[in-house]
Image (spheres, rainbow, N blue to C red):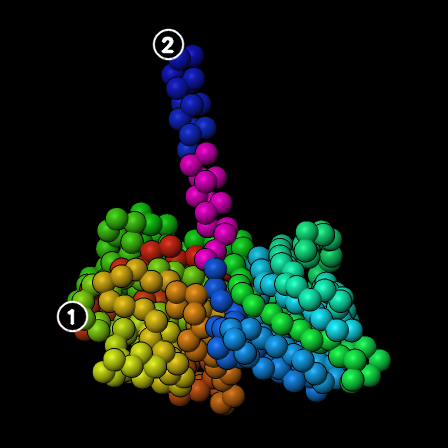
Amino acid sequence: MLNRKLAVAAVLAAGLLLSAGAQAQAVAEGQWINLFDGETLYGWNVFGNAEWTVKDGAIECLKGETGFLATTSAFGDFELTLNIKVAGKGSAGIAVRASLDGHFSETGGAAVSIPAGKNEFIPVRIVARGETVEAEVGGEKTTLTAKRPVGCIEIQHQRYHSVNQSPKITVTDVKLRPLGLNPIFNGQNLDGWNILPDHQSVFSVVDGALNIKNGNGQIETDRFYKNFLLQLDIFSNGDHLNSGVFFRGPKGVFWKGYESQVRNEWVKEDRTRPVDFGTGGIYGVNQARKVVSTDREWFSKTVVANGNHFAVWINGVQVSDYYDMRPVSPEGDGKNGYVDQPGTIHLQGHDPTTDLSFKNINLQEYPAN
């Protein structure tokens, strides 16, 4: 009888391990975001003398000297995919974990070169995990090393001897999926989270989601975070409900730090005219350029915070991009100044109409500096 019990226990334990493994795998692979919106160079910085434009849903660089595009946001472990065509002479390059303080090869980044000559699109896939960078360009695989743990993505234009013999570069479908995210909400209870007392919001776990009703109120993480990529799913069960995902908040202090707004409302029929900064805007400082999400539908939010730069994607579309150049706020209030210290991530119950749910709250933490 004892052996049978042990056998049953072993089977149950194996099942739990398999389930945990499946959950860890799901968490490790984040949601895809678009690094190029098909219309503008929003989310990119231009360096050098090469001339970059957007035409017919593609990034183009048809002339100029050596230069590159760099994402405003920094990324750690990820999978990157894009299509690139390099015609004429010279070459293009895709660099990852690059620093804007110097050449990628001198600052710990890595890059793959794509020579000109073929007037056709080539698929590129790059996976960066730790110091290992695996690249596949047109079916050919190579492995590189990147010592820098976090950095931007670069599209490089490299002329051939003279400006008159520059490569013609066309890039489409630039997408990124973060890897190695860890859950900060377990979907079962509120372990790891603290509710600020003496407020009206009611916090519970319903069907694997953290639900907030009534308000005002705040629930915050035990842990502090400064630089990170955060992904979560949100459901607003009402018309134009107001809430927010706060970060770098001083522990136990009500509604401080930075707020990534949640409010699916816009003026008339124009989603490019958000009300009250709009979902994905950095409240008080950077209005969302359009409201992508809709009430009573689950939508995803991705927040990148690194140093004084902050960016937000909603359903994979980048809606805010902000460099905080203000003096440091002594109170840790992101509406009134730069918050340079780690803090909690907290979710807001705004008022008595609040009825929102948050699930799949996963985070990739970046180095502090």
Cα distance, mark 1 to mark 2? 57 Å
Q: Residue furthest right?
A: 161
From what the image shows, is residue 210 above or below residue 73? above
Quadrant in the rendering for residue 126: bottom right
Farthest-out residue, bottom: 327
Precedes in sequence: disc 1 or disc 2: 2
Residue 119 location (% of width, % of height): 69, 66
Q: Which residue is mark 1?
A: 353
The stretch of residues the image draws in magenta is 18-31
The answer to whether residue 257 is left or right of residue 76 is left
Query: In the rendering, which numbered label is found on residue 171?
Result: none
The question of residue 20 being in magenta is answered with yes
Q: Residues within 10 Å of mark 1 (few under 14, many from 20)?
A: some
Residue under pointer 2: 1
> Depth check: 85 or 314 in front?
85
- Say which element carries label 1: loop
Q: Residue at x 51, y 83 (%)?
A: 323
Which quadrant of the structure image shows residue 307? bottom right
Look at label 1 and name its amino acid: Thr
At a point 54% along the width and 65% down the height, the residue shown is 173
Question: Quarter of the image containing the N terminus?
Answer: top left
